[in-house]
Amino acid sequence: MNIAFVVIGEEIISGLTDEKNFKKVASELYDLGFSLYLQVVGDRKEDVKFALDKAEKFSDFIICSGGLGSTSDDITRKVASEYFSLPLKQYEEAVEYMKRRLEERSGRKYDDIPDYLKIQCSFPAGAEIIPNTKGSAFGFKIRKGEKNFYFLPGVPFEFSAMFDEFVLEDIKKLFPNAFKYEKAVFKIFGLTETQIENHIEQIGIPDSVIRISYFPSFPEVMLRIIGKKHESFFEFIEKVKDTIGDFIYSDDVNKSFKDVVSDFLKRRGFSISVAESFTGGELSNMITDVAGASSYFKGAKIVYTADAKINLGVSKDIIERFGTVSHECARELARAAKSKFKSDIALSTTGVAGPDKLEGKNPGLFYIGVAYPDNKVESFEFFFNIGRKNLKVLGAYLALKIVLDFLKKTDGK
Amino acid sequence: MNIAFVVIGEEIISGLTDEKNFKKVASELYDLGFSLYLQVVGDRKEDVKFALDKAEKFSDFIICSGGLGSTSDDITRKVASEYFSLPLKQYEEAVEYMKRRLEERSGRKYDDIPDYLKIQCSFPAGAEIIPNTKGSAFGFKIRKGEKNFYFLPGVPFEFSAMFDEFVLEDIKKLFPNAFKYEKAVFKIFGLTETQIENHIEQIGIPDSVIRISYFPSFPEVMLRIIGKKHESFFEFIEKVKDTIGDFIYSDDVNKSFKDVVSDFLKRRGFSISVAESFTGGELSNMITDVAGASSYFKGAKIVYTADAKINLGVSKDIIERFGTVSHECARELARAAKSKFKSDIALSTTGVAGPDKLEGKNPGLFYIGVAYPDNKVESFEFFFNIGRKNLKVLGAYLALKIVLDFLKKTDGK
């Protein structure tokens, strides 16, 4: 089951504007098992015809967006007329609709509508009009043998409404079987794509599984599994959860890692504070990105220098004996933050962000310290040579993961 | 002059991830007069071959991105091998490179590289390797008669570097005429697209200007002007600089706003510290994103609560009289940070990030305080109702802009 999507728009092909409608199409159709094909071309007749031809070769179902306005660069009607060899014809019902709309908006009576709007009432003869309840540009549908072509305006909220009200209804009629599959989504931190794949292969993939997809977005991976409504599919999903559950932070596409940590902190009733060195604000920034953070975030100190660390409460002796990049310093920092900010939990980070060495230690080496509600303090060593910005992000994630693992195991206050 | 771009990626065709590389390609090539054609397909062999075939029909120059990782859904190497009828062959130079990289990252010695990395060292026999200085996935180039195919990894910062270093150089050789125009790029913070456009219309656009493009990327705008090598063009560019120069932070595409602030801090020899409330780490994070920040960044305190503000040195009386979201508190915070961290300059932020009101004040209201080397202290009020995350980013930018304006006017230490 293939579906082709053609975007017609100079503003997109020039890189000025992001294409926004494909995401809508994909989010409605991909998980149903459709293979999608996207083409984007500028406002050149020959390019649009080229794309329509390829779309027709790929699929019986072709959705196009854009180029239905009333200026000279809106060429979709003209191109469609030439492509299907159907002359452009003014649809009187469209003119009437446009007139009513104009009268409603202005509160005045109109004998006729302006020329620039009349342009939008012309379609290849035989086309079916697709109503636009959100704007003035109609869409249209053309059948050519077994092929269905849908032309919709590019304005996202118009496109989206017309897609739901008209195109999706057609798809449901044409492909009833597509709307019957099961889907599981897991958002994962702490395993690479390859590691997840290895685990899944060891579990064994039943025939009821239709598609397994990995979507890495540093430092996370999203895993999506599509399958048939069958016992073996549900068993497989349960096994996946049993095997890599420690690394799955959510099965809700709309939940971010920081959201989940925030939810757990609120649920357990613990407050948190931070002393961060090499992450330089990344960790606090993640925490405060979540609305409502002020109810559990007691504050942070960015202790970028040895002096700032001593000032927060790390003993000079510790730094002289072990250096700032050490287990000992990470633990002292966490302890100091907890006491200074009077929080239940405190996190610390200290390491070499790079690109230069620090205290003779290589970029990529870092320590995370954590002070728990019972005043126990732990520290962890990591080494990843992945560049300054990635290292900061990964450091912040790992610190939050340590907290999350603790929060999962405790009953809270 | 046509150029085809093929994106291979299930994560994009499924609507989960935004395609990010086409914008780079378009921003480099569209203004030079190339007609671009974009296709996006999922990780299905037949779909990729279909797209390659269409790309080949459209153009002699084909750029592909994605599918070069090491898991089973990374099919680009295999598809290319079949499409060009060239068997896959392990490139020993690639294996050697990968081994060195691994050793550098881990600090250990390796006799051999793991299988999953070896996969990334196989290419269709005869392909030319495109080096990847930012990651592990090599690219490759295949010539087929007059046709040039380039396969690059989809990770944006890898793609971008390889595109600049390799593909663009090839394009320059193949299409020398396209590169004969003059180009000016201005990176702007502090004006909207419309405001810039108004300024430019008032200056008057000479015939020698071929195209003016605006690329907004919150909260910045990049302005690009292409024109003929003519006196009137250069005069126009000078007038643009005279008119909006205060908001142009760089004319170098590769310089970020934070880089420019960092350069000025180093050049003037001033250190800086931060006390941030509603920006919650965003400001410190921006400062510490730049390598070498430790030479001038003395540290920060994230003073999210009233207590934390008092603890840093804001008087209780100020908070009781004016609230934490006030000119007075912003100034006290800046003063306190400067004295606590012993820095030459200190910045503070305090405001209502939202979504809820704070102290009866609306989300979007915020203050920035700044303490200068001569101990003068200023504060500024802003109001933008743009949502929590955008507000944090804008607040951090505005704080740095205040420092940048000061640094431009001073001789430094």
Image (tube, coloured by chain):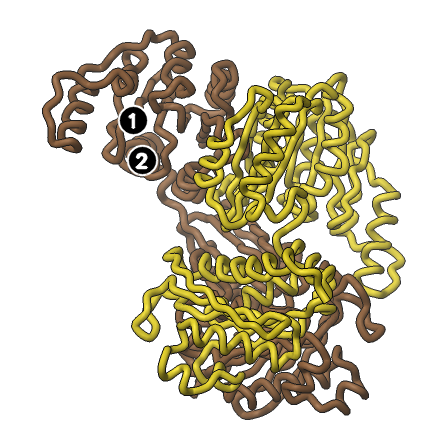
Chain colours: A brown, B yellow
Q: In this view, does B318 lie above or below B27?
A: below
Of A148 and A353, nearer the camera is: A353
Q: Name the residue under label 1.
A: A137
| Residue A10 visible in rendering | yes
- Crowd rating for badge 2 (residues with CA inside 10 Å; few <14, some 14–19, many 20+): many
Q: Mark 2 falls on what kind of element?
A: helix
Residue A243: percent from the left, percent from the top?
57, 66
- Amino acid type at image mark 1: Ala
Of A70 and A40, nearer the camera is: A70
Q: In this view, does A297 lie above or below A128?
A: below
Q: Is residue B281 above or below residue A56?
A: below
Using the rendered view, name the quadrant where residue A148 is placed: top left
Instruction: Tell me: B264 left or right of A208.
Output: right
Taking the spot 82% from the left edge, 51% from the top edge, the residue there is B98
Q: In which quarter of the image is the N terminus of chain A?
A: top left
| Residue A200 visible in rendering | no
Residue B115: percent from the left, percent from the top?
77, 52
